[in-house]
Every structure is written in C-alpha cells, then in structure tokens.
Amino acid sequence: MRKRNGSGEIELAAKIIDGRKLAAKLREAFALRVQALEASGACPPGLAVILVGEDAASAVYVRNKIRACEATGIKSVSHRLPSTVSNAELLGMIVELNADADVHGILVQLPLPAHIDVARVLETIAIEKDVDGFHLYNVGALVAGNTVFPPCTPYGVVKLLESEGVSVEGQNVVIVGASNIVGKPMALMLMARDATVAICHAKTRDLAQFTILADILVVAAGVPNLILPQMVKTGAIVIDVGINRLPDGTITGDVDFAGVAQKAAGITPVPGGVGPMTVTMLLENTIASAERASVRQRLVEARHD
Ligand code: GUN
C-alpha cells in the first residue's frame, strides 16, 4: 500500500494481516459444524491435551487451546503430568485415550522433558486422532501430498495467505527455521501449492542473501529482531511465526515489525497474527476428526441394520 507522509513523499506501509479477525470468522463457522454434528446424533468433538511439567509458555498455550475449544463447542479434557512422569506412564495414558470413543484428537504439548522419548510418544498417538499431524504416518502423508491432519501452525499460515488473496504458485518463498513443527511442514505445504521454496536455518551463511529474494517470507526462528528491513524485498509478504518474551515481559516476533512494515506489502503482527490461527486450525482438525469418526460409525451401523 502506498501512502504519503507529512512531507508529501511516497512511502510504503504494509497491510497488517489480522490473524485474530480471520480466526474469529473461521471459529464461527466451526461452531456451526459442531452443532450440525450433534444434530445428526453424533457425539460432540472431543480433544484430549496432555501437558507434562511446568513450562510456563506451554501452560499458556494449553490454556488458550482449552478455552478456544469451549467457545466452539468442542469437549476438551486436559491432563497434567509431573515432569518426573515415566515414559511408560505417558504412553499408557495415550493408549487409553486412543481407545476412548469420546476423544477425537490427542495433543501432547511440546517440548517434553529430556528423559521422554518424543518420537515414541508421537508414534503412539492413533493416526486418526493425531490432530497435530506429528505422527510419522501423517508426516509421510504430507510429503506425498495427501494430508490427513495438516500441522496447525503452517496450516494457519496457508489460511492467512489464502484469505489475503496471496497466490503462492510460482512465488519465491523463503522459510527461516527448519523445525518439524513449523519450517519443514510449511515447506511441504507450499511446495504442494507450486511455490519455489528455500529453507534457511541457524547454520545458514548470509541469511539476507536468501531472504531478499523472497516474495513471501515466513520466519519461525525464535530470535527477536532477526529480520531487518534491509533483508526484505520491497513489496514482499512477511509472515512472522516467532513468539518471544522479552525481559520486560512483552511478546515480540522474529521480525523488526516497525521497520519491515515500511517495506513489505503485507505483514503479520505479533501478537495477533499467526498465533490465533494455530489454535484455530487445531479446532478445525479436531472437528474434521469427529466428522470422520461419525461417518465410520454410520457405516458400522448400516452394516448391522
Ligand atoms: N509446541 C509448540 N507448538 C506446538 C504445537 O503446534 N503442538 C504441540 N503439541 N506442541 C507445540
């Protein structure tokens, strides 16, 4: 967007991409899907969240997820386990939830304490209840372009881009951060939509050499102010996935928002950008799981009629 400043000079000011607004709109539609499911006689969607230990940020994220479930009509149950919990106890809880017909989604909040075998935990979650999309089966489905549960944060980014009318086909996308939760699934989802994707990470030499080429820049590095205006192409779309707490308690992203907003065509704020969308796509995955369970149940009933 072009604006004139006080001296009459033209300056660029990005459109602020409002994740809260889109999240609210999507959640209204999700509440209707929950009502329709219940009206059909199916049980309401159920989400089980497991939180291990006392990590303050994880506790806040879990609380936000539970509240969002309540507001949408999803029945959520949170299970808090001490940081000393054994692998066997945690796996046992997941096995029980796998067998619980009222539970359509199981989410184990990450990170987990060092003694826990994370890969084993994620692979114990039933694939049809893996609303995070972190099970190897769902990761493989994502690689093959046949997603069952798209991981929530990159799914939220895709929805934000779609809602802004940003077509990714043929665009240069640069992703900063190569995590299993954001960077890697983000790359796969955008490749599936025919973007040209580069992934940068902590060992990338001369980050700016890559970021400056991006038509769409997605930053999920967990480093405040990592992306400065001189690293961004004029007119780029900048998606800031970072959530960093500064010593004074304020929350900030990975992008120098004030500076980059003068150069980009669109930018997500932190807070209020990607964060609300992550929770929203978790709701979507849980409802979709309950809808699929209801279809399976009807097929079983039809066989016994
Ligand atoms: N920790 C940070 N983001 C996530 C997420 O999307 N899911 C889970 N389970 N843990 C997380």
Image: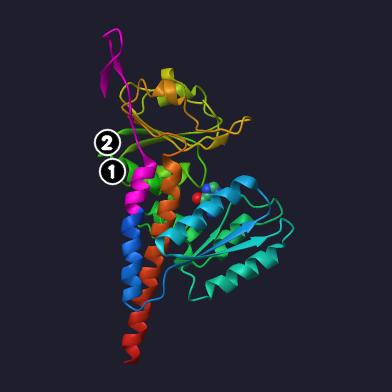
User: Which label number is shown at residue 27?
Assistant: none
Give the residue at x 36% y 25%. 213
**Quadrant housing the C terminus:** bottom left
Question: Residue type at mark 2?
Answer: Gly
Left-right relation of 295 to 133: left
Check if mark 1's residue and mark 2's residue have beta carbons within 8 Å.
no
Quickly name the residue at label 2.
Answer: 170
Q: Quadrant of residue 218?
A: top left
Separation (CA) of disc 1 from disc 2: 18 Å
In the foreground, 36 or 110: 36
Compared to 115, does 165 lie above or below? Answer: above
Quickly name the residue at label 1.
Answer: 163
User: Is 9 within the magenta?
Assistant: yes
Left-right relation of 263 to 4: right
Q: Position of residue 56 (x, y in %)?
A: 64, 46
Compared to 287, does 175 lie above or below? Answer: above
- Magenta-colored span: 1-26
Give the residue at x 49% y 70%. 103
Q: Nearer the viewer, mark 1 or mark 2?
A: 1
**Quadrant housing the N terminus:** top left
Q: Position of residue 149 (x, y in %)?
A: 41, 58
In the foreground, 38 or 267: 38
Whether residue 151 appears in this view of the structure is no
In the foreground, 102 or 176: 102
